[in-house]
């Protein structure tokens, strides 16, 4: 399958920055968000700020404020967001549960997701190490419905039929993980605006992935697809470590009948050992670099 990368002509360019307040933003975030801001400016479009605060166990108010402070210090401005509002809010994911639940219900009714009782440990032990460049091992299919059952749940059946034959007991997603069943062997192709043509094979490069967690929290893959569509995003700028997530999200867009987006994946910023930066790199956080005298220009350029 080749994703058609077109922008809806009824909307001008709309980019977004979508940090998560689970720690201080670092040098890699600064570079990616600055590129996103620059691309919005070059297209004379809008930049939207979304607070991806779904993980209530790790998100903290002080990190929310730090995001605003550090990004403004870098010189990044946005036209819509939790702090300034806009026509497509709310702009904090913790306030958007109804949107995600509606998407889960649609996927459930179409038979495109299934309940899974496997833990992270179960999957890791069965599937081995994660693929290179991805943080999720290929799911071995332990809880995947057999082909004979899946055939009854394909989109050619009506939503009412799917509910009647399979989904009726599941009026809500809590208690188990819900996985999206990928089309094994299908090639998902798209042209990245920075890295060029990309090809990922479902079932080989990534497997059935979680869209709703057992602790009753929508997963990243589902939440960003729903939000990007609702907020009329036309281009997603993010790190190259999320290329396989893009393939997953293209499948979700197709399943829910959403328009395709453009993608620009930035080169990763790495530490002296060649390891990509994470929030554990406190010494390279924007806040720490500010304290030791770095200028916004130096931080934006990656040092």
Image (spheres, rainbow, N blue to C red):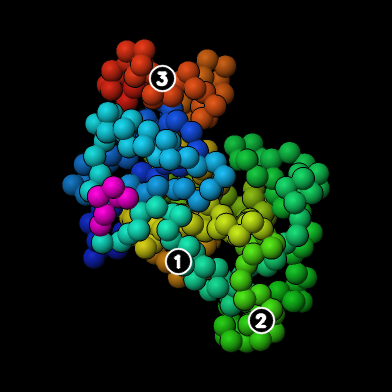
In front here: 8 or 47?
47
Identify the secondary structure beneath mark 1: helix
Q: Per the image, is 192 magenta?
A: no
Give the mark nearest the N terminus, 2 or 3.
2
Identify the residue position indicated by label 1 in the image.
99
What span is in magenta? Answer: 81-86
Q: Residue at x 77, y 63 (%)?
A: 143
Identify the secondary structure beneath mark 2: loop
In front here: 289 or 232?
289
Q: Quadrant of residue 140?
A: bottom right
Q: Which mark is residue 288?
A: 3
Majority secondary structure in the magenta region: loop
Distance from the alpha carbon under mark 1 to that under mark 3: 36 Å
Q: Is residue 101 visible?
A: yes
Identify the residue position indicated by label 2 in the image.
168
Residue 234 on image: x %, y %:
33, 55
Residue furthest out toward the left: 44
Q: Quadrant of residue 61?
A: top left
Q: Residue at x 72, y 53 (%)?
A: 139
């Amino acid at each position: 399958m080749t994703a058609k990368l077109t922008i809806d002509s009824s909307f001008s360019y709309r980019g977004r920055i979508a940090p998560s307040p689970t720690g201080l933003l670092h040098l890699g975030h600064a570079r990616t968000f600055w590129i996103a801001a620059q691309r919005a400016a070059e297209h004379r479009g809008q930049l939207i700020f979304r607070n991806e605060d779904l993980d209530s166990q790790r998100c903290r108010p002080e990190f929310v404020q730090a995001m605003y402070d550090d990004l403004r210090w870098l010189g990044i401005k946005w036209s819509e967001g939790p702090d300034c509002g806009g026509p497509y809010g709310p702009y904090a994911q913790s306030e958007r549960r109804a949107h995600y639940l509606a998407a889960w219900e649609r996927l459930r009714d179409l038979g495109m997701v299934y309940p899974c009782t496997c833990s992270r440990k179960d999957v890791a032990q069965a599937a081995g190490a994660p693929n290179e460049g991805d943080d999720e091992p290929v799911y071995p299919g332990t809880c995947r419905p057999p082909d004979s059952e899946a055939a009854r749940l394909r989109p050619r059946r009506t939503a009412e039929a799917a509910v009647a034959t399979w989904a009726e007991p599941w009026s809500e997603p809590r208690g188990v993980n819900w996985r999206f069943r990928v089309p094994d062997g299908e090639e998902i192709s798209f042209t990245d605006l920075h890295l060029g043509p990309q090809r990922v094979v479902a079932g080989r490069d990534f497997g059935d992935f979680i869209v709703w967690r057992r602790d009753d929290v929508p997963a990243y893959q589902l939440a960003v697809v729903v939000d990007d569509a609702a907020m009329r995003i036309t281009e997603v700028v993010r790190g190259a470590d999320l290329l396989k997530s893009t393939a997953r999200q293209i499948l979700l867009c197709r399943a829910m009948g959403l328009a395709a987006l453009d993608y620009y994946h930035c080169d990763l910023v790495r530490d002296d050992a060649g390891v990509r930066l994470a929030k554990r790199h406190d010494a390279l956080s924007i806040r720490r670099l500010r304290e030791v005298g770095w200028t916004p220009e130096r931080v934006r350029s990656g040092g």
